[in-house]
Image (cartoon, rainbow, N blue to C red):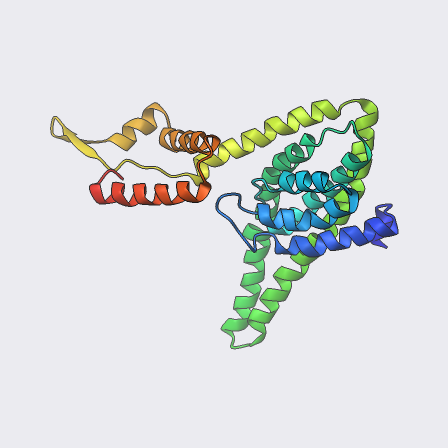
Amino acid sequence: MIKEKFNLTDEESKLCFKVALRSHTMSAPYCWEKMQALSFLYTMIPVINKYYDKKEDRIEGYKRHWELFNTTPSVSGFITGLAASMEKQGAEDPNFDKSSISAVKTSLMGPFAGIGDSIFQSTWRVISMGVGLSLAGNGSLLGPIVFLLLYNIPAAFVRFIGPYMGFGLGAKFMENAAENGIMSFITKAASIVGLMTVGAMTATMVSVNIGWVFNMSGAEQSIQAMLDTIFPKLLPLLLTLFCFKLLSKKVKPTLLIFGLMIFAILGTWIGIF
């Protein structure tokens, strides 16, 4: 029924089923360097292996999906399905710009995270928990069971149906884009949105605060407050650019992480932070 709904062949339907199963691992091996990249790569392995025969093309495909990715796990299926559809297009069309796959992924992860967090994390989880707590408060063993069922059944359904939707709609979308000649515009727009999304994460996920306070004419003045007045989130931005510069110089991420940990501990001990 799903296959007919999205006009998929038997092979495409089987592939989407594999993608749907693997997309359930999203956030399982979470990595602070690239977040859900390992899960996304694991999800895309059957797609890469199916559509690319040459070893070099497969390695390139693996590297393409070993990039930073982070969204609400429940809604990640649509993006994996869309990426699978674009990989198929890239394997069949030698003129297809494969960099657009990464651009579209990056541009979608932010909006989908907003939708997924609003629906599942902030709303439906609270409602499900409320129902479960009301039962548990009355001494019923059904409390935790009802909560798990109420929350996970819709979430699992969205995870499962997402790859089919992404693949089915994605193939049509890519064909229309290629025929209308707007693929280059979409790639550029997606790249801009993706860079904005990743850039905005700097202000929300990187925290650097100066703890120094000095007296001026009997009044205490915080250096951090002064910096925030002049340029809010300046220190997180500078730290991010510094780390990016070191990574571009081939400094290993593990070494950089341990270096930041030591710097933070020493800075806190001295009183800088």
Please say if 2 is above or below 94. below
Q: Quadrant of residue 156?
A: bottom right
Can residue 105 be seen here? The reply is yes
- Nearest the camera: 231 or 38? 38
Residue 99 in the image: x percent, y percent?
67, 31
Please say if 171 is above or below 123. above
User: For this view, does 26 lie left or right of residue 85?
Assistant: left
Give the position of the C terminus as an image quadrant.
top left
Q: Quadrant of residue 270?
A: top left
- Nearest the camera: 243 or 110? 243
Counting every numbered tag in the picture gives: 0
Give the position of the N terminus as an image quadrant.
bottom right
At 69% from the left and 35% from the top, the residue drawn is 101
Can residue 118 be seen here? The reply is no
Outermost residue to the front = 55
Q: Quadrant of residue 252?
A: top left
User: For this view, does 106 lie left or right of residue 244?
Assistant: right
At 61% from the left and 60% from the top, the residue drawn is 151
- Nearest the camera: 39 or 191? 39
User: For this view, does 91 lie left or right of residue 45?
Assistant: right
User: For this view, does 139 lie left or right of residue 213?
Assistant: right
Residue 246 in the image: x percent, y percent?
43, 32
At 80% from the left and 43% from the top, the residue drawn is 168
Residue 150 in the image: x percent, y percent?
63, 63
Residue 203 in the image: x percent, y percent?
44, 34
Please say if 123 is above or below 177. below
